[in-house]
Image: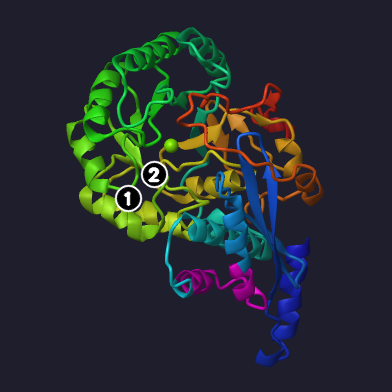
Amino acid sequence: MMQIGFILIIRMNSSSGQKGIYIMKVTDIKTFVVDCFRTNWVFVKVYTDAGITGVGEGTLEYKEKALIGAVEHIRSYLIGKDPTQIEKHYHDIYRDAYWRGGVVLMSALSAVETALWDILGKHLGVPVYQLLGGKVNEDCRIYVNGWFSGACEPKEFAEKARSVVDRGITAMKWDPFGKSYLQISNRDLDKAICCIAAVREAVGDKVDLLIEAHGRFDVPTAIKIAQEVAPFKPMFLEEPVPPNNLEALKAVREKSPVAISAGERLYTRYDYNELFHLRAADYIQPDVSHAGGIMELKKIAAIAEVNYIPFAPHNPSGPVANAATLQLAACCPNFCILEIMYSDVVYRSAVTDENLVYENGCIIIGDRPGLGIELNEAECLRHPYVEHNLRHYTGALTDIRPPENAFYFGERKKEDF
Ligand SMILES: [Mg+2]
């Protein structure tokens, strides 16, 4: 109702001449840092003098304080400006940082850019995907991450995998490589392969397995691992080498018998330009919270499209990033599959009004205006920042969820809404 009222205000003012046209202005930007067990979600909320607000997410694991500072700089720029000039603001903020790119500045810009799309969608009364060309997908296939919480041995992974498939999930990802870094011992590699074999046997041939390497390995080790996992027919092997050298990634891809995915730690079209030029990956995984926001991902996906590269967005963070990524899943023709966390802290459902509809291994694309999600500020404040550290190289990677966690989609049926 607020959107309809605002449009009427503009029309009434328009009839009295150009000088009378009311232009919405940004009045404030706030960040909400919410402890979520493995890290802190960082939500950004943009306020306007029209009463319309927008939300974005820049969740930047373990670098939250830097992110808050970067958002403060953008706040100084954006106060008093028209929030609907999204492309202009993106361009100016990116250019005027002088020190371009990098995950801190880009995560801040991504979160704010996303919030501006939310405002524009609410202002016009349409979902964001409608502003980007409309739906090409009514739903989006998902693969789950975090489903293995607490598992250590292959049989524990197999048991959890079986229960995941019982919920209708058709694809799942995990990192079976313990605390290995650069190289892997034969013993640890055997354990990883046993784990993959146990999961494959538990779920059967029809479920897609995605193997995550978190940028751990050097080139020869990555190639060896790609060869070892090939008999289990993974959909892809993700980030087999660290993210800083795309020639090295290309060297792995050229000798890998399985598809290679990468890109969660690349930012902007400019980083992706090199990946596309080298053809260093088979699947791309830009993150809407880090690579530049909604329009930047739309553009990256479009360049991937002309190279016949599937778009499989990275999406392990919170509900607002998930809502933003769903907008892209709706409108990108080369969208392939969406990462999503299998369960979360029990208060995830209270932090926003997230309303995911799950059917047959897919999330149905919603039709609420904007991103279709609202932040509960009071609930956010109940879970203040807690310092967390990276677990990837400690062997504690599967400690990803608290004992009391909740499956936050799929429990309700579509007709319930
Ligand atoms: Mg990854």
Marks 1,2: beta carbons within 8 A = yes
Q: Considering the image in quadrants, where does the N terminus appear?
A: bottom right
Image position of 174 (left or right of 127): left
Q: Residue 75 in magenta?
A: yes
> Which residue is denoted by mark 2 in the rendering?
311
Image position of 258 (left or right of 316): left
Image position of 269 (left or right of 82): left
Q: Which quarter holds ligand 1?
A: top left
From this viewpoint, is residue 205 visible? no
Q: In this view, does 387 lie above or below 195?
A: below
Name which residue lies at 58% across and 56% down. Answer: 67
Q: Give, as a three-letter code, the residue at label 1.
A: Ala
Residue 304 tag number: 1
Q: Which SS does the magenta portion mostly show?
A: helix
Asked which secondary structure carries label 1, the reply is helix
Q: Give the range drawn in magenta.
A: 73-94
Tell me residue 181's x, y (percent). 36, 30
